Amino acid sequence: MTPEQQTQLWRSRDLKHCWHPFTPQSIWGKESEMLFIESGEGVWLRDSLGRRYIDGNSSIWVNIHGHAHPRIVSAIAAQAGKIAHSSYLGFSHGLASDLATRLCSYFPKDTLSRVFFSDDGSTALETALKMAFQSWAQTPGEEARRSFVAFNNCYHGDTMGAASLGGVANFFDKFKGYGIPVHHATGMADLHALSQDERASIAAIVIEPIIQGVNRMTPWPKGMLLELREYCNDNNIYLICDEVMTGFGRTGKLFASMIEGVIPDFLCCAKGLTSGYSPLAACLTTESIFESFLGDYSENKTFYYGHSFTAHPIGCAAAMASLDIFEEDQVLENLVPKIELIAQLAQQLEQSSPYVRAHRQVGMILGIDITRADGSPYLQNERAGEKACVAMRPYQLLTRPVTHDTIVFMPPLCISEQEIRQAFAAIEQGISDALACMPS
């Protein structure tokens, strides 16, 4: 069977049996070619027809050190040769102990000292929400803390609890009223306007630190995270930092909250924890919160939550190898010139392209806003961002938009400066090719 025949067979099977996330299935495979990604090396992906592409969005923001990294592959293979999985419920294993210790070591002593493992970003957030709720319920005098605060246009996952936090109408309006009680704020002014009684009912405030992802890659004002930490301290409210997207070097620091020296009460991470090689998530929290779950067995303070693949050994092996690479290859230190180059090229793109109106950057995270040449916005149903990204494929770049008109560039951290330049050339040409053909 030729690659073309094999691809066509897979395509027919996909259209008959598969259901893709965040994808309008009525137009799937009809308006643009269906790519089947078969392999990868470094920042490059290869499809079933042998074409190569720069992975411009890190395979949905998960890959950190590149594809088929020999040290991570070796660590996974070695662990798979021992045991792929055993229950973490009532048992333990050394890799989980080592990984938990290592994650806690990145924070000052006696701050984030406990780790609860789960599967992905949504379950890491579910862990934090349920822990916060139960912790206050078991604290005398604080039982009224039963609601949460999140921010407008936020995104924290798709399970029902995490979806309750979501502030993006297209994703979450259908599910309003079926999850946990959540108040949405636009910023610190809204929080300061809350009455004392309202503040006393809040279990935790949840934030994507430093920059919101799905909200067009929008950074928070400088100092806002530190102000929020102080607000939570003053009002005895837990702070949950969702570092699923921002963690593991994306912002130039290992965790985004480190930029302003903030230690949350819960820190949730996933995606880049294993450099995208295996599903694994972690929720870090404090010793005082952990101790609120201790007591006589008859008090029933146990945290009854978990997953079959909690502390999955293969995921733990991948995570340990990924963290080794951070330290041994000085990954964070080597990001500085790449971050500067992205800033320079993004500014040049905004000045040279008639379709680029703005860009926002934090570290290796970039959002590029597109409009018509006259500056007027595209409508959502015109899908301008999607069409521009499809038009980048012939120039060897794969990425996706957030919303309909913000293009994301968030490559693996191992990308070279030459590959960054090649990616920007593809972005500019793809935007031009796609948008020049759209109605003005």
Image (cartoon, rainbow, N blue to C red):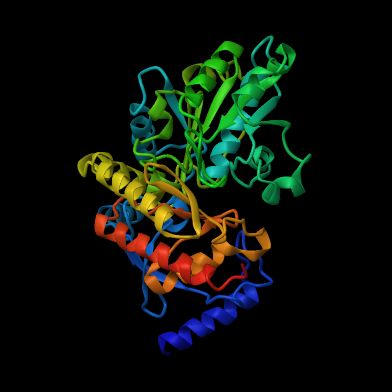
Residue 340 position in % (x across, y down):
30, 44
Q: Position of residue 51 (x, y in %)?
A: 37, 76
Residue at 55% in and 68% down: 387
In the figure, 75 relative to 19: above or below?
above
Task: Work out whether 34 lies above or below 398.
Answer: below
Single out the residue that lies furthest toward the right: 177
Residue 163: quarter of image: top right
Q: Residue at x 49, y 65 (%)?
A: 389
The spot of residue 7 in percent (x, y) is: 48, 82
**Between residues 418 and 74, which one lies in front from this camera angle?**
418
Q: Is residue 174 visible?
A: yes
Quadrant of the drawing holding the N terminus: bottom left
The quarter of the rendered structure image containing the C terminus is bottom right
Q: Is residue 319 above or below residue 228?
A: below
Q: Quadrant of residue 247?
A: top left
- Front-most of residues 433 and 223: 433
Residue 191 point in image, percent of width and height: 64, 22
Q: In the figure, residue 273 lies in which quadrant?
A: top left
At a point 60% along the width and 64% down the height, the residue shown is 20
Number of numbered discs visible in the structure rendering? 0
Image position of 83 with respect to 200: above or below: below
Whether residue 134 appears in this view of the structure is no
The residue lying toward the viewer, choosing from 309 and 41, is 41
